[in-house]
Image (tube, helix red, strand yellow):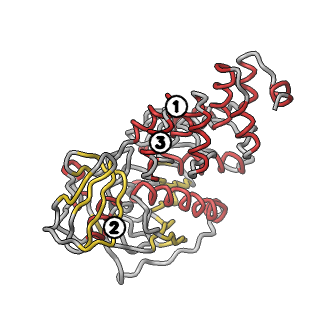
Amino acid sequence: MAGKNNIAVDVLEYLIRINNGRYELGVVCNKTETGKNSWQKSLRFFSQRCNVPEYHLEDMYMRDDLIFISLEFDKIVNPDLFKDARLYNIHFSLLPSYKGMYTSAIPILNGEEMVGVTFHEIDKGIDTGNIIAQKKIKVDQQDTSRDLYSKYISNGTQLVLSQIENVIQDKVHAYPQEAKGSTYYSKKYIDYSNLKIDLRQTALGIQKQIRAFSFREYQLPVVCGKKIIDSKITDIRSLKKAGTIVEQNENGIMFASVDYNIILYIDRFYELLEACKTGDLDLVKDICSVKKHINECDEHGWTPLMVATYNNQKKVVDYLLINGADIFAVNNNGTNLLMYAKAAYLQYDDIELLKKFFDLGVDIEREDYRGKNLESYLKDDGYKLDELLSKM
């Protein structure tokens, strides 16, 4: 298996679980692989932990009876170079449309309401192989490219897993792609090194740009020197020239457009994390009036709720929960809220947040990406889980 990120790790984990000695497993990692979990899980980290050997692509060419599955792999796979192989790929679109690059952004720019994922055979073309299976995905009106990518990952994983047994047993049924509806976008289609929001558009056109280029791990759109986290089309008809600032405050800037005024909300996420740390509830409420902030996460995977929990800021925690904070989110290492609440308990001798998240259903048995759960971390700190539970 070749590739990166959660989809590759989760498929590999499944293959390990169902193997029972039926096949030999190996991975080929992307050249950008660091071996460390970031906002996505690391294939190298997981494969090493599970003693699955890593190879170079060239090592695969002369293998007999090879099954090669590409899951966000970053190299061109030429079928002619393989001696004896069945080659498969997951592509984040409903082929034959959106071959090529930027499938998390371009469909949003184009106003698509439905996208999907395709599991297909690899041939010598770019995403042109015979289709094995597809799954449609609805594009919600507020989805950003980050949101759409997350949908691709989860639905793509499900699609691949649904076909794994057919792949192993060589029972896949594939059909050729049609020319009708076929589109292709190259790397040159979007210049991410020079992104500019065109404000001389309709309000909807501006909003689609904001959504398409919002992917915090890579970039947020910048307007008037401010990073933008979200937008809202008003019902106020624009009376000024498109691109003119109508009004602004600390949370956003209202612009005139070709038709309706639009508010571009300013990113204050790191200010929010600091407010969650110090317990500044008024500031938390002000920033979270732009709801998009509530479930954002930083480069460590920390959400506002995690930061508030770790620092035992109970009023902030309650406010975030009431306003939709995700209690099941984990950081880049798989640390969940019970583990953060454990840290608060040890530091502040206050069990309230531990009890709260336990009662809300956060999984006490869930392991992080190192294979440790709450009980094992408590043991490291000299505590017993049973004794802790008796205090709740």
Q: Which residue is mark 1?
A: 279
Residue 138 in percent (x, y) is at 49, 71
Q: Is residue 48 above or below residue 380?
A: below
Q: Amino acid at mark 1?
A: Gly
Residue 149 in percent (x, y) is at 45, 57
Lower sequence index among marks 3 and 1? 1
Q: 103 and 75: which one is in front? A: 103
For disc 1, the neighbor class at 10 Å (few under 14, some 14 to 19, many from 20) is many
Disc 3 to disc 1, C-alpha distance: 18 Å
Q: Amino acid at mark 3?
A: Cys
Q: Residue furthest front?
A: 282
- Residue 49 disc label: none
Q: Residue at x 48, y 53 (%)?
A: 71
Residue 359 vs residue 213: left or right?
A: right
Q: Residue furthest bottom?
A: 180
Mark 1 falls on what kind of element? loop
Q: Which residue is mark 2?
A: 233
- Residue 297 disc label: 3
Mark 3 falls on what kind of element? loop
Do the CB atoms of the residues marked 3 and 1 lie less than 8 Å apart? no
Q: Amino acid at mark 2?
A: Ile
Q: Residue at x 21, y 66 (%)?
A: 256
Q: Exactly how many numbered labels are in the figure?
A: 3
Q: Is residue 54 above or below residue 118?
A: above
Residue 198 in percent (x, y) is at 19, 62
